[in-house]
């Protein structure tokens, strides 16, 4: 009985760690013009090395992207 309880505890702990590791990180920012600091809307923002994680800046230059 104790062996089963120990085994279940280990399995649930490992599952919890795997779930916590699978969480995406959210990166936010603002793209501005280097000359006057004005926000730049419609800029494509992507994760380096991953062409599938893409977003565009809003009208105020802000963006939000989930990074795996």
Image (spheres, grey):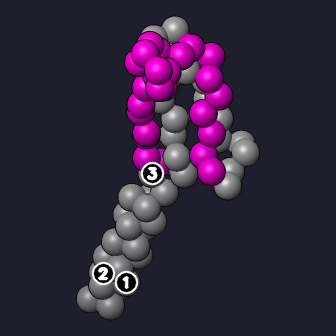
Tell me if 34 is positioned left or right of 8 in this view: right
- Quarter of the figure that contains the N terminus: bottom left
Q: Could you say which is closer to the camera, residue 16 or residue 33?
A: 33
Q: Mark 3 points at which residue?
A: 23
Which mark, by number, is residue 7?
1
Q: How far apart are marks 2 and 3 (CA)?
A: 28 Å
Secondary structure beneath label 2: helix
Which mark, by number, is residue 26?
none
Question: Which quadrant of the figure has residue 15?
Answer: bottom left
Is residue 35 one of those drawn in magenta?
yes
Q: Distance between the residues labelled 1 and 3?
A: 25 Å
Is residue 29 one of those drawn in magenta?
yes
Residue 38 location in percent, x, y? Answer: 44, 13
In this rendering, the label closer to the viewer, 1 or 3: 3
Is disc 3 surrounded by few (<14), some (14 to 19) or many (20+) residues within 10 Å? few
Q: Can residue 5 be seen in this view?
A: yes
| Residue that protrudes farthest toward the front in the picture | 35
Q: Distance between the residues labelled 2 and 1?
A: 5 Å
Residue 49 location in percent, x, y? Answer: 67, 55
In this rendering, the label closer to the viewer, 2 or 3: 3
Q: Is residue 17 above or below residue 24?
A: below
Secondary structure beneath label 1: helix
Q: Main secondary structure of the magenta part?
A: loop
Q: Are marks 2 and 1 in contact (CB under 8 Å)?
A: yes
Q: Could you say which is closer to the camera, residue 43 or residue 54?
A: 43
Q: How many marks?
A: 3
Residue 3 location in percent, x, y? Answer: 32, 91
Secondary structure beneath label 3: loop
Residue at image x 34%, y 71%? 13
The span shown in magenta is 24-48
Q: Could you say which is closer to the camera, residue 25 or residue 18?
A: 25
């Amino acid at each position: 009985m104790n062996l089963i309880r120990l085994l279940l505890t280990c399995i649930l702990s490992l599952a919890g760690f795997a779930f916590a590791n699978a969480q995406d990180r959210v990166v936010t920012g603002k793209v501005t013009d280097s000359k006057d600091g004005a926000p730049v809307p419609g800029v494509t923002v992507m994760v380096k090395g991953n062409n599938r994680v893409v977003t565009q800046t809003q009208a105020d230059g802000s963006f939000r992207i989930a990074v795996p």
